[in-house]
Image: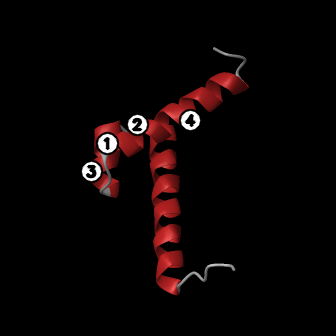
Amino acid sequence: MKKTTTVEELLVAQSEIMKDMFIAELAIAGVPQREIAKVVHVDLNRVTRLAKSLKRRKADANGGD
């Protein structure tokens, strides 16, 4: 049986996705991670995890630079 998702749960999930997108955009723009964490009101570990992921993807796209 499929679990039903409430509107509130969908809004929370959407909010978290938007935060991740905002973090990614700020990281790409070169904003320091501590400042991103303050602006987005999230844990610094979350910012670091996303920023590292972006760095790895960029390195893979450039041939491992």
Give the mark, 2 or 3, whose residue is nearer the N terminus: 3
Residue at the spot 32% in from the left edge and 53% down from the top edge = 42
Measured from the top left, where is residue 65 in percent x and y? 63, 14
Q: Amino acid at mark 4?
A: Leu
Q: Which residue is mark 1?
A: 44
Secondary structure, mark 4, is: helix
Residues under labels 4 and 3: Cα distance?
20 Å
**Mark 4 sits on what residue?**
54
User: Circle 2 — which element?
Assistant: helix
Q: Which residue type carries mark 3?
A: Lys
Cβ–Cβ under 8 Å for marks 1 and 2: yes
| Crowd band around label 1 with a 10 angstrom C-alpha radius: few (<14), some (14–19), many (20+) | some
Q: Which mark is residue 48?
A: 2
Q: Amino acid at mark 2?
A: Thr
Measuring 69% from the left and 80% from the top, which residue is drawn there?
Answer: 1
Horizontal arrangement in the rendering, residue 54 relative to residue 41 (left or right): right
* Tag 2 near tag 4, CB within 8 Å: no
Mark 3: secondary structure: helix
Residue that carries the numbered disc 3 in the rendered image: 38
Give the camera-side residue of 27 and 45.
45
Picture coordinates of residue 48, whole percent (x, y): 40, 36
